[in-house]
Image: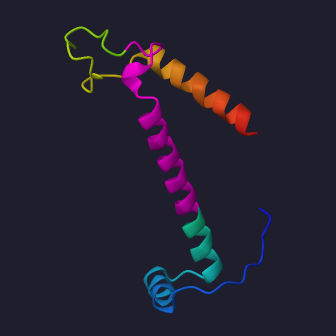
Amino acid sequence: MARTRISTTVDADRLEDARTRSGLRDSELFDRALELLLQRLVIEAELSSLDRFPYELDSDLGVGEAPGDPEGALPYDGAVPSRIQRLAEERRAERERRAS
């Protein structure tokens, strides 16, 4: 992993609290903080996508076609249908291809 030196000013109390609680070196703290930030940004992007493109409007997913699902809600009891899993894998692979 390539390393980059940074110089910045942060909240002294928060940094000391993180050092004390974790026992980690500053570089490890910042690596973990960056990882958590990136994870949060991915979650926010996914939630934003769901707001713009709700599951129930996606004809590929066939939401509402499950027996006993008169309101068109996703069935949360039981396994995820294999065709939904395949579609999710295909879309994930396509996003990764576009991102690289």
- Residue 7's spot in the image, x, y percent? 72, 84
Per the image, is 56 magenta? Answer: yes
* Residue at the image position 48 percent from the left and 22 percent from the top: 85
Residue 71 location (% of width, % of height): 21, 17
Residue 80 lies left or right of residue 85; in this view the side is left
**Measured along the vertical axis of the image, is residue 79 above or below residue 97?**
above
Q: Quadrant of residue 72?
A: top left
**Count of numbered circles in the view:** 0
Question: Residue 45: x percent and y percent?
Answer: 52, 45
Question: Magenta stretch containing residue 5, yes or no?
Answer: no
Vertical side of 91 occupied by 31: above or below? below
Magenta stretch, residue numbers: 35-62
Magenta stretch: dominant secondary structure: helix
Quarter of the image for residue 59 reads top left
Q: Position of residue 12 (x, y in %)?
A: 51, 91
Quadrant location, the N terminus = bottom right
